[in-house]
Image (cartoon, rainbow, N blue to C red):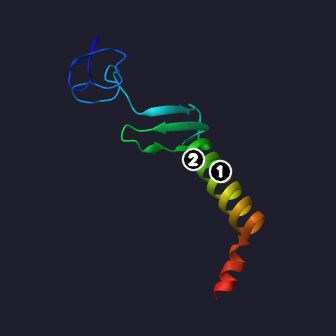
Amino acid sequence: MKPCRECGHTISEQAPVCPTCGVPYPARERWDGWGFEYKSQATLFGLPILHVCFKFRPNRVPVPAKGIIAIGQFACGGLTISQFGVGVFSISQFTIAGFALAQFAVAYSLVAQFGIFLHQGRGLLVWSLADIIRRLQ
């Protein structure tokens, strides 16, 4: 038995929630959310070389992966592998990128099911941004 880190009520070490105050995992000294996160110690330009993050904060807000190589549900970086991504090179379901492989994309160059590109694009329904602007005039 241990005291809850918030209210001090005695609880089991395996308790998922404090019965008094409702704090999640009350026996742990520190708890910063649900899920998995790995950040490499090595950095480049202030970003970790690798950041893998499938995590939610205690207030249930997702934590984005930010790094040279970023992998997660939400990701931002040089190479992103994600559901929602922003990056130079991106493999995502939804992305804004320089070069993209995605279901929905806005990119300089892309391969996508649906997308808007600046230079070159391949896919089911992809359009050049220049063509879209031309048609609007």
- Disc 1 vs disc 2: Cβ atoms closer than 8 Å? yes
- Residue at 51% x, 45% y is 64
Local SS, label 2: strand
87 left or right of 22 in image = right
Q: Residue furthest front?
A: 19
Local SS, label 1: strand
4 left or right of 111 in image = left
Position of residue 99 measured from the top left corner of the image (x, y, whole percent): 71, 57
Position of residue 80 measured from the top left corner of the image (x, y, whole percent): 64, 47
Label at residue 103:
none
129 left or right of 1 in image = right
- Residue at 57% x, 47% y is 75
Q: Earlier in the sequence, mark 1 or mark 2?
A: 2
Label at residue 92:
1
Relative to 19, say whether 37 is above or below: below
- Residue at 73% x, 67% y is 125
123 left or right of 92 in image = right
- How would you rate the neighbour count of disc 1 (Cα within 10 Å): few for under 14, some for 14-19, many for 20 or more? many
Q: CA distance from mark 1 to mark 2?
A: 9 Å
Disc number lying in front (1 or 2): 1
Relative to 80, say whether 128 is above or below: below
Label at residue 75:
2
Relative to 6, say whether 60 is above or below: below
Position of residue 68 measured from the top left corner of the image (x, y, whole percent): 62, 44
Residue kind at label 1, given as amino acid type: Ser
